[in-house]
Amino acid sequence: QVQLVESGGGLVQAGGSLRLSCAASGSAFSFMNMYWYRQASGKQRELVATITVAGNTNYPDSVKGRFTISRDNAKNTVSLQMIALKPEDTAVYYCNAKATWDPNLLYWGQGTQVTVSS
């Protein structure tokens, strides 16, 4: 069982920056691919950042160049650095972990609200 706890959300003006963190429990963190998703009010949840166990990253065009995902296996944490934030980045951001040995094993954090004012 893995528990994920996000932190770092808040209110920021357009053009500002925020750094989200996700702390994972357990000893399997380094064997899990990690993701950040977001869900805006009334919209579907969307993937915004991926980091694999090998450290490979991927982003959709909507955040590429503005968001950076990183992980620290020694501390069991994954972070999302967000710069040049836009009002359309406003959403609840969720940390997600997927086991590399079983794709059906996935875990979600409780989410953290990010609000970008114009």
Image (cartoon, grey):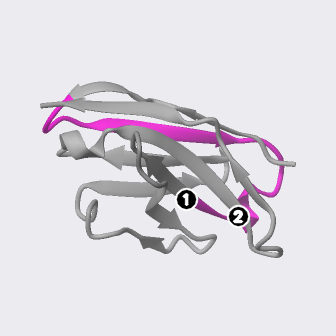
Label 2 crowd bin: few (<14), some (14–19), many (20+), radius 10 Å? many
Which disc is residue 35 wearing? 1
Q: Give coordinates of residue 85: x percent, y percent.
A: 21, 43
Circles 2 and 1, Cβ within 8 Å, touching? The answer is yes
Q: Amino acid at mark 1?
A: Tyr
Q: Give coordinates of residue 29: x percent, y percent.
A: 73, 56
Which disc is residue 11 wearing? none
Quadrant of residue 75 in the image?
A: top right
Residue beneath the point at 39% across and 43% down: 40
Residue beneath the point at 44% across and 31% down: 113
Extent of the magenta region: 13-34
Residue 57 lies in magenta, yes or no? Answer: no
Q: Secondary structure at mark 1?
A: strand
Quadrant of residue 109 in the image?
A: top right
Cα distance between the residues tagged 2 and 1: 8 Å
- Relative to 33, is 77 above or below? above
Label 1 crowd bin: few (<14), some (14–19), many (20+), radius 10 Å? many
- Relative to 53, is 95 above or below? above
Q: Which residue is mark 2?
A: 98
Q: Amino acid at mark 2?
A: Lys
Q: Is residue 85 left or right of residue 40?
A: left
Q: Quadrant of the C terminus?
A: top left
Residue beneath the point at 76% across and 73% down: 103
Residue 20 lies in magenta, yes or no? Answer: yes
Front position in the image: 2 or 29: 2
Front position in the image: 95 or 42: 42
Q: Is residue 111 left or right of residue 65?
A: right
Q: Secondary structure at mark 2?
A: strand
Front position in the image: 7 or 76: 7
